Structures are given as structure tokens and as C-alpha cells.
Amino acid sequence: MIRFTLPVATAPEFPTGYTTGLGDLTLMDIFLVPGKEISFGAGPLVVLPTATDDALGAGKWQAGAAGVVVAPQSWGLLGGLVTYQTSFAGESDRDDVSLATFQPIVNFNLSKGFYLRSSAIWNFDLESGNYSVPVGFGVGKVFQVNDKVTMNGFVEPQYTVFDHGSGNPEWQVFVGVNFQFALGK
């Protein structure tokens, strides 16, 4: 399973207000081991410094690993994604990166392709000791584009329940569109 994430983000920039643009590109290649009730996976992770503004990215090349556990349920899905990444190159005047994340995933299926979701990413900055633990509750819809392409759109407001350090948002909104492509005939 290959996953890439290229966020469009808005961040405060003092004293001028806010900046919006692209963040850093994260690539994961997770090798899944399917099970009857629980599936596991692990693989490499790399982060490319693609942010369009210093406030939106780390300015560092990063590498690490990702692990996933998924347990399909009759009503939906339970899962979790854990990552670790550390910087190995990049702008020398920017802070080094040593970041661990945990993303609990809960999806509750509704009718006609709709579902409820919670998937806020908990961030733990191992360099500074800062952390942010948000929780979210949102809604999504899965569309069958054609026999080989499935699209998933969602919106999930998230509130930070625990945090330490500056710059952590109290509220954020996670909005996304995912595409799945069937390979082969």
C-alpha cells in the first residue's frame, strides 16, 4: 500500500497574520500482512521538504518507518497508524526533526456510502518535548467513479484535548479526498 500526503495548510505567522500553501510531502510504502480478523503492516517513510513557506514545513529531508494495524468490523473499521521520522539533511538553520505520530482510526459505516469517522493525528516532537493530541469527529462519503477508481471525500473537525508547546492549534479541520485505483484487468 503506497500512501502519499501533500497537505494544503494555513499557519499563523506573527505579526503579519496567516500564510497558506503546500506543506511537506510524506511518502509511505506499507507492506500488508492480511489476517482473518486483524491485518498488520510496516514499511519505510520519507518526507520531502516541499513546503511553500517556512511556517508550513520543516525544511528538512526525513526518513523513518510506519506501522499499521487494521481490524475490520461488521459496523466499520478500527485501526491505528504509527510513524517515526528523523531528519538527515536540509536547511542547516532549521531545527532537526525527530517526530513520532499515532493516528487512531475509527470509521462507522452508514447507508449509501456515507460514514462517520475519527482519525486525528497525535504528534510527539521528540526533539523539543512538545506534543499535540487532538480528537476528531467527521463525516465522509465513498463514491465509485468507475470499475477501477473509488473516491473518498471527507471533512473532520478536530479539537486538541492535550498539548504542550507553542503553535499547536486548538481547533483544526481535516478535509481530504482519496482515490483508490484497482490494478490489473
Image: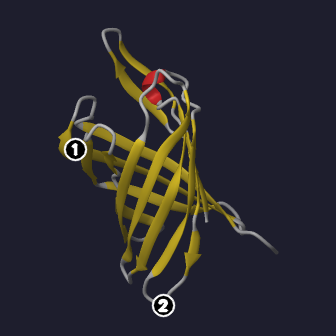
What is the x, y in percent for residue 142?
A: 52, 62
**The residue under label 2 is which amino acid type?**
Lys
| Along the viewing direction, whichever of 41 and 23 lies nearer the viewer | 41
Residue 71, quarter of the rendered image = bottom left
Residue under pointer 1: 160
Furthest-right residue in this view: 185
Position of residue 119 relative to residue 107, above or below, is: above
Left or right side of 152 for 72: left
Q: In the structure shown, which secondary structural element does the residue marked by tag 2 occupy? A: loop
What is the x, y in percent for residue 4?
A: 59, 50
The residue depicted at 47 percent of the width and 49 percent of the height is 85
Residue under pointer 2: 36
What is the x, y in percent for residue 117?
A: 35, 61
Alpha-carbon neighbours of circle 2 within 10 Å: few (<14), some, or many (≥20)? few
**The residue under label 1 is which amino acid type?**
Thr
Residue 167, quarter of the rendered image = top left
Looking at the rendered image, the quarter that the C terminus falls into is: bottom right
Q: In the structure shown, which secondary structural element does the residue marked by tag 1 occupy? A: strand
Looking at the rendered image, the quarter that the N terminus falls into is: bottom right
Position of residue 91 relative to residue 41, above or below, is: above
